[in-house]
Amino acid sequence: MSRSTSTHSHSGRAGDGAPTEDLHVTIAQRLRGDGLRYTGSRRKVVEVLAATDRPLTIPEILEQADGLAQSSAYRNLTELIGVGVVHRIVSGDEFSHFELAEDLTSHHHHLVCTRCGRVTDFTVDDELEAALDAALDAAARRQGFEPEHHRLDVGGRCADCR
Amino acid sequence: MSRSTSTHSHSGRAGDGAPTEDLHVTIAQRLRGDGLRYTGSRRKVVEVLAATDRPLTIPEILEQADGLAQSSAYRNLTELIGVGVVHRIVSGDEFSHFELAEDLTSHHHHLVCTRCGRVTDFTVDDELEAALDAALDAAARRQGFEPEHHRLDVGGRCADCR
DNA sequence: CTCAGTGCAAAGGATTTGCATGCCG
DNA sequence: CGGCATGCAAATCCTTTGCACTGAG
């Protein structure tokens, strides 16, 4: 839960200095809670994900995590997903995209380019989000469904592919 | 493209009699427009999808399309998707789910069970849907993104898996 | 020391594709 | 008849897994 107290909402850059150090502390704790270690590889993966403002694919992650084996990347991500630190996005037929879990960043949605597959984040007005949440909850329960989260993707052409 | 002028929105059941006959006419036309044929296999696939009220997987489709080869089912679905008659849903790691395109049915969203993978349809209030649509459009364009459609999925536990 | 983590290579599994044949128009 | 459609089997390709070794506590 711990809504990260990070001063800035991880605008884009970062991933190095100390501003996000508490992020790593939080993650280390969650992993430890499951008897897992926050190794250099895992931290590197997290740093790569934290340094960008959009979900990344395995190839993109490996590109920045010098020397990390592909299988290790997949395994690390699986563990991180297991402790709720990372979220996986499946969008299309290509590679899956990975991002830090929303409770480590903030609730947002995705713009998925139907041409190049690129995924970008975006948010909607809080008020609308609340109304949406309430409506979804009601509609789901009406069918005996217990809602846990919602995912809102907008498909279309990104600025580069228009 | 071509906002179909189909009169009714095909409620749910059906798939046999004549009430949905114009659905097949529409589909046949779209296929023909691309030099493709509306064969028995393809019609069968469409009938299976039209006869249910939720997206189906390839195994589920094959179960009802007696004798159809798996590769043909995939190929038929690919062609049908190509002419905008069928839509593919990727939700998780398992099989993809397929459903008739929204302009042949009606705009709706999905409840995806995180345990058994089952996908069910649901809709939200028209007013909220309109507000949502406007907000998404604005947010997308703000990033130079040309929105084409939106997909709203709610993850959670279905009635059987609670 | 002990056990989780890692790399490498092989296995898995949903989906795609090559090829010869069947069938609609 | 000509070309799309279909089956079957083999190939793809992202992702997972087996195994032996390395490393952190």
Image (tube, coloured by chain):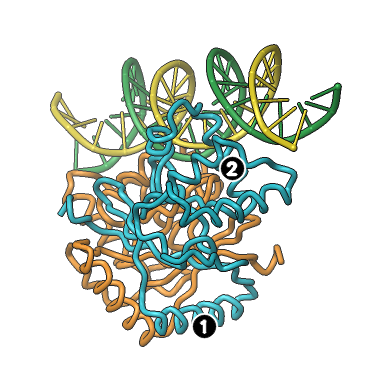
Chain colours: A cyan, B orange, C green, D yellow
Name the side, left or right, on which B94 lies relative to B49. right
Residue A37 placement (x, y as % from top left)? 67, 40
Secondary element at tag 1: helix
Quadrant (top left/top right/bottom left/bottom right) for the N terminus of chain B: bottom left
Tag 1 residue: A134
What quarter of the picture does the C terminus of chain B occupy? bottom right
The three-letter code of the residue at mark 2 reads Thr
Tell which residue pokes out farthest to the front in this image.
A18
Residue D9 higher or lower than A126, as above or below: above
Q: Nearer the viewer, residue B86 or C19?
A: B86
Label 2 residue SS: helix
Task: Report whether residue B111 is seen.
Answer: no
Respond whether the residues carrying marks 2 and 1 are from the same subunit. Answer: yes
Question: Going from the N terminus, do you reach mark 2 or mark 1 first?
Answer: 2
Closer to the camera in the image, A159 or A114? A159
The residue to which callout 2 is attached is A78
Label 2 Cα crowd, 10 Å radius (few <14 / some 14-19 / many 20+): some
Q: Amino acid at mark 1?
A: Ala
Q: How many marks?
A: 2
* Residue at position x 45%, y 84% in the image: A131
Instruction: Tell me if I can see residue A30 in this picture.
Output: yes
Residue at 30% across, 45% down: B79
Measured as percent of width and height from the top left, residue A157 is found at: 22, 56
Residue at the image point whose x is 42% and y is 64% from the top:
A9
Residue drawn 51% across and 77% down?
Answer: A136
Check the image and name the residue furthest to the bottom.
B127
